[in-house]
Amino acid sequence: MGAGRLLILLGVVLIVVGILFSLGERGPVRFGRLPGDIVLRGKHSVFYFPVVTCIIISVILTFVMWIFSRR
């Protein structure tokens, strides 16, 4: 795969991710707010770690890279 195609693919992926994040709460899947994501609230602070969101994104990216590496 040439560098031009790779840059176009990367641009399309970034556009799709940007649209998903801009939809936020209105979208069908609320990334970062899935069951299993860790949120610890203290008096003056909040610790947030999106465990399930990271796993889902990792699986999706692994699948996409696997598809493109087969060519």
Image: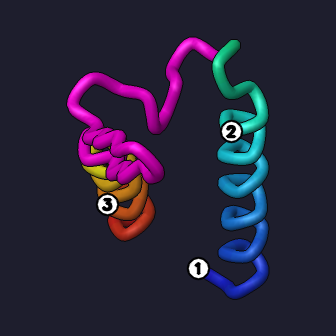
Q: What span is colored magenta in the figure?
A: 27-53
* Closer mark to the observer between disc 2 and disc 3: 2
Tell me the crowding category of disc 3: few under 14, some 14 to 19, or many 20 or more residues within 10 angstroms, Cα based. Answer: few
* Closer mark to the observer between disc 3 and disc 1: 3
* Residue 61 sits inside the magenta stretch: no
The type of residue carrying mark 2 is Phe
Residue 26 shows in the view: yes
Label of residue 1 in the image: 1
Tell whether label 1 touches label 2 (CB within 8 Å).
no
Question: What residue does disc 2 label?
Answer: 21
How far apart are the two marked residues, 2 and 3, measured between alpha carbons? Answer: 24 Å
Question: What residue does disc 3 label?
Answer: 66
Instruction: Assign a secondary structure to mark 2.
Output: helix
The type of residue carrying mark 1 is Met
Towards the viewer: 31 or 64: 31
Q: Residue at x 21, y 31 (%)?
A: 36
* For marks 2 and 1 on the same chain, the one whose residue lies earlier in the sequence: 1
* For marks 3 and 1 on the same chain, the one whose residue lies earlier in the sequence: 1
